[in-house]
Amino acid sequence: MKDLEAIKGILPHRYPFLMIDRVLEVEAGTYCKALKNITANEEVFQGHFPQQAVFPES
């Protein structure tokens, strides 16, 4: 399992585009299972469907 600092050492992305908080599983060249903690204060929600915010799909 990789934490945020380890992830930053691998990916070039930074806030607000680093949308991974923790990596749970990795199979190189195949898939990655990760977590993103989402709060109502996320920048992607600002002005997005007031009263009915939707997080963009990946």
Image (cartoon, grey):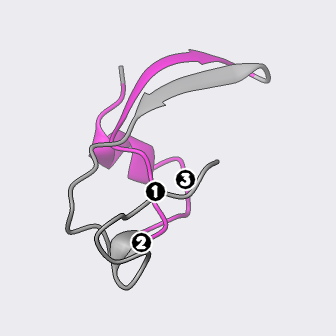
Residue 37 percent location from the top left of the image: 27, 43
Residue 3 percent location from the top left of the image: 29, 35
**Label 1 Cα crowd, 10 Å radius (few <14 / some 14-19 / many 20+):** few
**Tag 1: residue type?**
Phe
Residue to which mark 2 is pinned: 44
Q: Are marks 2 and 1 in contact (CB under 8 Å)?
A: yes
Q: Residue at x 21, y 62 (%)?
A: 40
Asked whether 55 falls inside the magenta stretch, the response is no
Residue 9 percent location from the top left of the image: 44, 50
- Pick whichever of labels 2 and 1 is earlier in the sequence: 2
Residue 27 seen in the figure: yes
Q: Are marks 1 and 3 in contact (CB under 8 Å)?
A: no
Judge whether 35 appears above or below 6 on screen.
Answer: above
Please indicate whether residue 35 sits to the left or right of residue 25 in the image: left
Per the model, the C-alpha gap separating discs 2 and 1 is 7 Å
Residue 27 percent location from the top left of the image: 66, 14
Judge whether 21 appears above or below 24 on screen.
Answer: below
Please indicate whether residue 31 sits to the left or right of residue 30 in the image: left
Residue to which mark 1 is pinned: 55
Residue to which mark 3 is pinned: 11
Q: Secondary structure at mark 3?
A: loop
Q: Residue at x 77, y 19 (%)?
A: 30
Number of marks in picture: 3
Q: Secondary structure at mark 1?
A: loop
Per the model, the C-alpha gap separating discs 1 and 3 is 22 Å
From which residue to which does the magenta span run?
2-28
